[in-house]
Amino acid sequence: MARQLAILGSTGSIGTQALEVISEHSDLFEIYALTANNNAELLIEQAHKYMPDTVVIANEKKYPEVKEALEDLPIKVWAGADAIAQVVTADPIDMVLTAMVGYSGLRPTIEAIKAKKAIALANKETLVVAGELITNLANENQTPIIPVDSEHSAIFQCLNGEWRNPIEKILLTASGGPFFFKTKEELKTVTKEQALKHPNWNMGAKVTIDSASLMNKGFEMIEAKWLFGVKPEQIEIVVHPQSIIHSMVQFNDGAIMAQLGIPDMKLPISYAFSYPERLKSLSKRLDFFSCRSFTFEKPDTDKFRNLAFAFDAINKGGNMPCTLNAANEIAVDAFLKGKTGFLQMSDIIEQTMAKVSFIAKPSYEDYVYTDTEARHIAGQLITGS
């Protein structure tokens, strides 16, 4: 029987590419549920094409539009965050792709794990915010978490068959984004439009800004710590502008395993859906004769302070990574709306981390409180109130 999938964030960059993978292998996968935040128009279009059992629109104001458009079809239409957390527990679902952006992915991931659904994890913020809680919950429920981020998928692939061999170091590659070679002085005047022009990857706005500030790499470092059971000091960030080597693992004998490929998210999505099998893909292949050189650089944490903040947050532990994420979400939103500058995002994050109450052993309720407090403080810093 075809594997039943729930796609959380089906209208975003990862979600739409996941549906392309499913279309290429319709004999293997079926859509049970689709969810979106605001894009009702695309959600309706996807529902007509894939005929899921259920669709959920997070923005409850968009519910009448979706409901009316699908009223002649045998599709359940729900709305709101509670509905997203509920739909992932449906009995027929085999795997949940968590492709929602930001903190909003935490609760449905928790509910899916409790319901013993396999997780294809594209929402890195889930492990950034509550890595210890999520990993413990997954172990208790014997629920697999298969990474979808290209870097973590690469590490996962490099470790396949090597689980008994100790990891000496993870080499987490980064493209560097559009601003890596700019001076700090030049970064003072970069615009939203410039930041959204990623040189290699096609991603959503929030992730693209995080890539430009290297916060995305800080989040991925935290995610890697929880996924692969390593210490932060075992993770080295390597800027590789060509984005061909997606990440590497160094073992205790000095051998390094790497996963290479063109920048295409459909490969890690497909691998997560089909693991341990590899499915035939129609994607373009890597041509080594067109790759003139591979280069590697060290990140400058004086220019890109967000990366340093990520290491500070995970080393302190507790609710500090949750604070980091919440402050970053508010800062990025402000930058996208023209309310703050590129470098000022780091100032907002740093000050918020200094002001939020620290909790060494947070519960889920503590994470919820921390997220609210950090967003409030960061918002005040932006408005000056």
Image (spheres, helix red, strand yellow):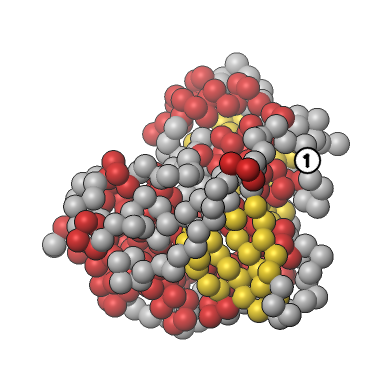
Q: Quadrant of the C terminus?
A: bottom left
Residue 373 lies, in percent from the top left, at 32, 67
Residue 359 lies, in percent from the top left, at 42, 80
Q: Quadrant of residue 214?
A: bottom left
Figure check: 32 above or below 88? above
The reply, left or right, for residue 152 in relation to residue 368 is right
Residue 307 lies, in percent from the top left, at 40, 68
User: In this view of the protein, which residue sits in the foreground, 330 or 367?
Assistant: 330
Would you call the spot at circle 1 few (<14 residues within 10 Å), some (14-19), or many (20 or more)?
A: some
The residue to which callout 1 is attached is 279
Q: Is residue 189 visible?
A: yes
Residue found at x 64% / y 45%: 288
Q: Quadrant of the N terminus?
A: top right
Residue extending furthest toward the left: 384
Residue found at x 67% / y 38%: 285
The reply, left or right, for residue 124 in relation to residue 343 is right
User: In this view of the protein, which residue sits in the foreground, 66 or 314?
Assistant: 314
Q: Is residue 372 visible?
A: no
Q: Amino acid at mark 1?
A: Leu
Residue found at x 70% / y 32%: 282
The reply, left or right, for residue 269 in relation to residue 163 is left
Residue extending furthest toward the top: 72
Q: Quadrant of residue 158?
A: bottom right
The reply, left or right, for residue 94 in relation to residue 352 is right
Residue 378 lies, in percent from the top left, at 26, 63
User: In this view of the protein, which residue sits in the foreground, 29 or 221?
Assistant: 221
Label count reads 1
Figure check: 63 above or below 319? above
